[in-house]
């Protein structure tokens, strides 16, 4: 095995977020409020199945054990199930996760599980169908809920649900969410709204910290769980009276980046060292042949030497990221 990917701050990278498309069919207020609009200028196609195989193999060789397939909405790719199978077949990859808006889950989740998908994250920003429609731009609450049920029927022991915290919209719905997970093995993850290049006014109007939720949980007997080395950034709390769990992702908190263990590759084959970085490292030319793997690993490792100690979000830096769909959130 090649040397473990590591940066200048001795952070090791066990977790790859692999975007396979930036196209999405939802119009979430915090991501693509005007819907997906392809760039007018001609650009390369998204990575092929062979390219996905090669980049995943390189990461696996260097210690990555978890791959999350993201978008846009990854299931818009017709070969999504083949992508899952390709990633799952890599030696060393023990977790194959996805993040989805859930609209295709009810019909297809059993096939994804059979192909090797081990973990699912579904975005559900409200349990009120009308507010869900308002936030996502789509009237698909019923389909998404049916998809979560189908995931359990297909054999998943837990489903993670992502909820972007939005002041004056869903931030007061904690009691409903807690009731929802009391008898369901759902890890509900509240994600603080993050400021991106196109979302300044939304951030100013709707950002709210997750600290008040954390304080409420601790005061009511919830206990912080210990993380595995390939877990994401959520602080996860459990309670003996609840089948479900609560996760908090608070990127504005001090030392959030200290435990960073993940890298991103965009659907165009570009390595992004941080969701809010100022540039990417192009890998596409080294994804054309299996024989290029050594050079590919060397380029990734070289890029890691440029990874900053922090995202500097608290200083108002939003990097080059125009919106979260552009490099997979």
Image (tube, rainbow, N blue to C red):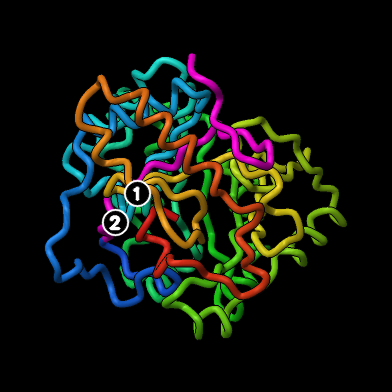
- Pick whichever, 65 or 10, lies toward us: 10
- Residue drawn at x 30%, y 44% is 269
Q: Is residue 130 visible?
A: no
- Residue drawn at x 35%, y 60% is 326
Left or right of 63 on screen, residue 293: left
Query: Chief secondary structure of the magenta span?
Result: loop
Left or right of 61 on screen, residue 306: right
Q: State the image coordinates of residue 131 (x, y, percent, origin top left).
A: 45, 73
Residues rendered magenta in the picture: 1-24
Q: State the image coordinates of residue 180 (x, y, percent, origin top left).
A: 59, 53
CB contact under 8 Å: marks 2 and 1: yes
Q: Reading the chain from its start, which is encountered first: label 2 or label 1? A: 2
Which residue does the numbered mark 1 point to in the structure image? 266
Q: Which residue is the extreme one toward the left?
A: 42
- SS class of the residue under badge 2? loop
- Pick whichever, 251 or 102, lies toward us: 251
Q: Is residue 232 visible?
A: yes
- Sort mark 1 into few (<14), some (14-19) or many (20+) by Cα contacts within 10 Å: many
Which residue does the numbered mark 2 point to in the structure image? 22
- Sort mark 2 into few (<14), some (14-19) or many (20+) by Cα contacts within 10 Å: many
- Residue drawn at x 25%, y 21% is 290
142 relative to 313, above or below: above
- Pick whichever, 190 or 199, lies toward us: 199
């Amino acid at each position: 095995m090649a040397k473990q990917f590591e940066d200048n701050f001795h952070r090791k990278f066990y977790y790859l977020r692999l975007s396979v498309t930036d196209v999405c069919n939802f119009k979430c207020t915090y991501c693509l409020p005007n819907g997906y609009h392809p760039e007018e200028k001609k650009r390369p196609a998204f990575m092929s199945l062979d390219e996905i195989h090669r980049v995943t193999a390189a990461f696996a060789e260097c210690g990555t054990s978890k791959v999350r397939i993201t978008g846009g909405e990854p299931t818009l790719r017709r070969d999504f199930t083949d992508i899952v199978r390709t990633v799952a077949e890599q030696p060393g990859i023990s977790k194959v996760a996805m993040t989805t808006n859930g609209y295709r889950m009810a019909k297809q989740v059993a096939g994804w599980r059979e192909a090797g998908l081990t973990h699912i994250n579904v975005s559900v920003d409200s349990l009120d169908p009308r507010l869900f429609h308002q936030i996502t731009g789509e009237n698909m609450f019923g389909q998404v809920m049916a998809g979560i049920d189908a995931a359990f029927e297909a054999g998943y022991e837990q489903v993670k649900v992502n909820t972007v915290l939005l002041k004056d919209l869903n931030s007061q719905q904690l009691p409903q969410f807690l009731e929802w997970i009391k008898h369901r093995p759902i890890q509900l993850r509240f994600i603080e709204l993050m400021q991106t290049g196109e979302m300044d006014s939304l951030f100013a109007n709707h950002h709210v910290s997750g600290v008040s939720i954390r304080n409420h949980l601790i005061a009511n007997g919830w206990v912080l769980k210990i993380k595995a080395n390939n877990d994401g950034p959520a602080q996860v709390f459990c309670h003996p009276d609840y089948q479900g769990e609560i996760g908090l992702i608070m990127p504005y908190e001090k030392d959030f980046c200290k435990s960073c263990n993940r890298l991103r590759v965009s659907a165009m084959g570009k390595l992004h060292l941080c969701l809010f970085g100022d540039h990417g490292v192009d890998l596409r030319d080294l994804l054309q042949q299996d024989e290029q793997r050594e050079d590919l690993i060397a380029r990734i490792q070289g890029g890691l030497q440029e990874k900053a100690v922090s995202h500097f979000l608290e200083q108002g830096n939003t990097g080059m990221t125009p919106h979260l769909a552009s490099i997979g959130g």
